[in-house]
Amino acid sequence: MLTPDTAIDALGGTGAVSDALGLTPSIVSGWRTRGIPPGRWPELVKLAADKGCPQITFEALANAAPIEARA
């Protein structure tokens, strides 16, 4: 099952994701515990496609989101 940790790690880690999205590493690091904001999912799905990580999809990210973010 995909989690924020496994998604970020699959994309190269906190530094790689923050560089790719133009964010600070602390923002991406916070996603590991708070969940990945839905507004960032399109960027992550595109990044995953570019990096050959087919397991990172909108559906997988939705299932990995904290319960309160799914509503």
Image (cartoon, helix red, strand yellow):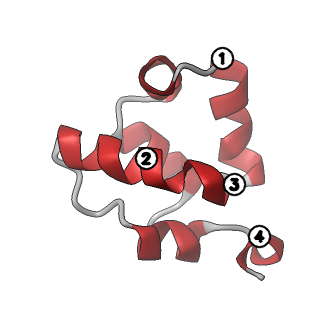
Q: Helix or strand or loop: what does disc 2 sit on? A: helix
Q: To which residue does mark 2 refer?
A: 44
Question: Three-letter amino acid code at disc 2?
Answer: Leu
Residue 69: image tag: 4
Alpha-carbon neighbours of circle 1 within 10 Å: few (<14), some, or many (≥20)?
A: few
Judged left or right of residue 25, residue 11 is left
Q: Quadrant of the C terminus?
A: bottom right
Q: CA distance from mark 1 to mark 3?
A: 16 Å
Please tell me which of labels 3 and 4 falls first in the chain.
3
Question: Three-letter amino acid code at disc 1?
Answer: Thr
Q: Is residue 67 above or below residue 5?
A: below
Outermost residue toward the right in this view: 68
Please tell me which of labels 4 and 1 falls first in the chain.
1
Alpha-carbon neighbours of circle 2 within 10 Å: few (<14), some, or many (≥20)?
A: many
Q: CA distance from mark 2 to mark 4?
A: 17 Å
Q: Is residue 56 above or below residue 16?
A: below
The residue drawn where x is 46% and y is 29% is 17
Q: To which residue does mark 1 refer?
A: 24
Tag count in the figure?
A: 4
Picture quadrant of residue 54:
bottom left
Please tell me which of labels 1 and 3 falls first in the chain.
1
Q: To which residue does mark 3 refer?
A: 35
Q: Helix or strand or loop: what does disc 1 sit on? A: loop
Q: Of the residues tagged 2 and 3, which is closer to the observer?
A: 2
